[in-house]
Amino acid sequence: MRRTALAVAAAFVLGALSHAAYAANPPRLDDALVHLRYALNALKRAEVAGKASAHRDQAVQLTEKALEEVNQGIKASAAK
């Protein structure tokens, strides 16, 4: 019971600290674009077998869609 209470308290403290960090320096779409490109590259290079290849292929498609959406968001924010 004590460990659970301590874990919950630690989670609240860490959550508050991370929220403060994001509030001070919010993530930008450009940063998301870079990370999505890295993820897409890693997915395409990943070696999988059997049914896992279908899941990897779907992850590649969804990541490509996310890249398109982020690019559209960047264009929309630049048009302001």
Image (spheres, rainbow, N blue to C red):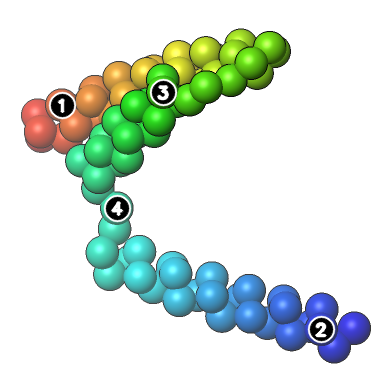
As drawn, the label of residue 3 is 2
| Residues marked 1 and 4 touching at CB (< 8 Å) | no
Dot 3 lies on which element? helix
Please indicate, yes or no, whether residue 61 appears anywhere in the rendered image: yes
Residue type at mark 2 is: Arg
What is the spatial separation of the Cα atoms under label 1 and label 3, in whole angstroms?
A: 29 Å
Question: Where is 62 relative to 77, above or below?
Answer: above
Question: Where is 25 relative to 51, above or below?
Answer: below
| Residues marked 3 and 2 touching at CB (< 8 Å) | no
What is the spatial separation of the Cα atoms under label 4 and label 3, in whole angstroms?
A: 27 Å
Which callout, 2 or 4, points to the residue nearer the camera?
2
User: Circle 4 is placed at which residue position?
Assistant: 27
* For marks 1 and 4 on the same chain, the one whose residue lies earlier in the sequence: 4
Which quadrant holds the C terminus?
A: top left
User: Circle 3 is placed at which residue position?
Assistant: 45
Q: Residue at x 61, y 76 (%)?
A: 12
* For marks 1 and 3 on the same chain, the one whose residue lies earlier in the sequence: 3
Residue type at mark 1 is: Lys
